[in-house]
Image: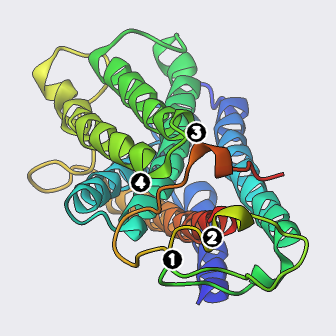
Amino acid sequence: MNRTLGWLVILGLVAGLVMGFLVAPRDAAQGNVQRIMYVHVPSVLVAYLAFAVVLIASIVYLTTRREAADRIGHASAEVGVLFTGITIASGAIWGKPTWGTWWTWDARLTSVAVLFVMYLGYLLVRGMVDDRERAARYSAVVGIVAALDVPLVHFSVYWWRTLHQPPTMLKPGPSTMPGVFAATLLVNLAALALVYVFLVMKRVRLLRREEEALA
Amino acid sequence: MPDNWSFVIAAYLLAAVVLGAYWRHLVKKECELEHVNPSMSGHVNHSGTGPVNQSVKGTAVNQSVKGTEPRVPGPGHPRSEPSTRHPLP
C-alpha cells in the first residue's frame, strides 16, 4: 500500500511537472512566471485540506479521546504548515516580478501569515507541554480555533479591497480559466494531495511508534 | 512581460527542497526509532494500550513503573509521571 502510494506520488509529481512546463502554454499577460501558480494554488488548497483534517481530528479527539485522532491531527498540522510555507514563499517569488514587491500587508497575505503562525503555535503547544494527554487536549483546542482563520483567508479577497486577485478555484459559478490551465492546476493539485496523504500516513506511523517507545 | 525563468525555477526548487527536507527528517526519525528499538521495525501495536516489547534487552523505557500501576485499557493517552519520562536519544 505504502509503496504503491509512493509510486503514485512520483507519477503525480512527474505528470504535474510535464503539464506545468510542457503542456500548459505561456500566459499571454504574465509570461512564464504564471507557471508558479501550478505550485502556489495547489499548495494553499492542500493546506486548507490539512487544516480541515486537523479540525475534524481535534473535535473527534476532544469528544472520544482517541489517540489515533490526535496523531492524525498532529501529523496533518505539520504537513499543513509545510504547504502553507510553500504557499507564502512561492507567492512572494511570484509577487516580485508581477507586483514589484515580495510582500505587502494585503488582507489575503496577512491572513495566510496569521494562519501559518497559528498552526506553528499548535505545534509549539504540543512541544511545550510534557504530559501527552494535556498536550493533545490543548492542541486540539488550538486546532479548532485556528481553523476559523481558513474561511477568513479564502474570503478575504471578497471582504476587503486587496491586491491579491479573487480565487480561480473553489469559487461559485463556472470556471473562467481556459481548459488547459485548469487541467494543469488539477493535475498538480492531485499530485500535491497525494504527497500530503503520503507524508501524513508516514508521520502518523512514526508518532505511533514514538508513543510506543516512550510508553 | 519578461519570462523571469529564474523566479519560476526558484519557486519549484523551494517547494522541492521543503518537501524533500521534511521527507528526509521523517526517514531519519524512523531510523532513530529502529535504532532505539530494533524489534519494532515493521511491528505496529494497533491498540496502543498494551505493553510493548518487554522482552527487548537494553531498551529500558519506563521499566520502573511496570508492575506498580496496572494500565487500564481504554481511550485516551496513558498518563505518565514526569519522573518516568525519558527523551528519545
Query: Which disc, if any, is residue A46?
Result: 4
Contact flag, marks 4 and 3 (Cβ < 8 Å): no
Residue A184 visible in the shown view: no
The structure residue drawn at horizontal position 48% and vertical position 73%, both measured from the top left corner, is B71
The percent coordinates of residue A90 (x first, y second) are 56, 34
Can you say which quadrant of the picture contains the C terminus of chain A? bottom right
Dots 4, 2 in contact, CB < 8 A? no
Q: Nearer the viewer, residue B25 or A165?
A: B25
**Which chain hosts label 1?**
B
Q: Residues within 10 Å of mark 3 (few under 14, many from 20)?
A: many
Determine whether the residue tagged by mark 4 lies in a helix, strand or loop: helix
Question: Mark 1 or mark 4, which is nearer to you?
Answer: 1
Image quadrant assignment for residue A116: top left
Q: Helix, strand, or loop for circle 2?
A: helix
Q: Secondary structure at mark 1?
A: loop
> Are the residues flagged by discs 3 and 1 in contact, CB closer than 8 Å?
no
How far apart in space, not on screen, are marks 4 and 3 (Cα)? 23 Å
The chain carrying label 4 is A
CB atoms of marks 1 and 2 within 8 Å: yes
The residue closer to the viewer here, A97 or B70, is: B70
Q: Position of residue A13 (x, y in %)?
A: 62, 66
- Could you say whether the residue bearing mark 3 is in a helix, strand or loop? helix
Name the residue located 77 percent from the left edge and 59 percent from the top edge. B29
The verdict on a common chain for dots 1 and 4 is no
